[in-house]
Amino acid sequence: MGISESSTERCRYRSKTRRSLRCFGRISAFPRRRESGLSVVIPYPDPDIDVAGIVRSVIHHYFFPILSGDLVVEVQGNGVSETLDAQTLPTFVERSELVIGTTLVAC
């Protein structure tokens, strides 16, 4: 998860030119090139943050947009890739125990 310091040495960001943006795209390894959407890179994440924790947080905060099919979330890090969408969401909820309000949600 994130960008190693050695990879950042390959590119230095002095300005927001096309060249520096292409370089950033290479070292961040975004698979999406032409599709619309939002991509977020966390270059130096807290070591306590992992893919499972991000997935739990995404489910907690974006349950209904994902369930309705309005949102698809892809989480990648440390060789793990997870896609949360309307079809996969029930499986993720079954695997995690989420407390929403005072109700334990487990489908």
Image (tube, rainbow, N blue to C red):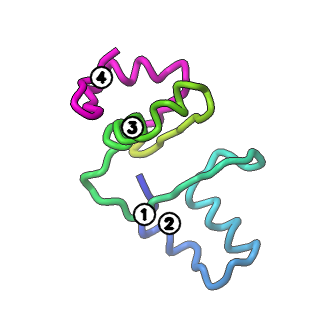
Residue that label 3 marks: 55
Q: Earlier in the sequence, mark 1 or mark 4?
A: 1
Label 4 to label 2: alpha-carbon separation:
41 Å
Q: Amino acid at mark 3?
A: Val
Point out residue 37 in the picture as x, y percentages from the top left corner.
67, 48
Residue that label 4 marks: 105
Q: Amino acid at mark 4?
A: Val
Residue that label 2 marks: 7
Point out residue 60 in the picture as x, y percentages from the top left corner.
37, 37
Q: Amino acid at mark 1?
A: Ser
Which of the two marks, 4 or 3, is nearer to us in this view? Answer: 4
Pick the front one: 55 or 77: 55
Label 1 to label 4: alpha-carbon separation:
37 Å
Bounds of the magenta span?
Answer: 80-107
Q: Secondary structure at mark 3?
A: helix
Q: Earlier in the sequence, mark 4 or mark 3?
A: 3
Which of the two marks, 4 or 2, is nearer to us in this view? Answer: 4
Q: Amino acid at mark 2?
A: Ser
Which of the two marks, 1 or 4, is nearer to us in this view? Answer: 4
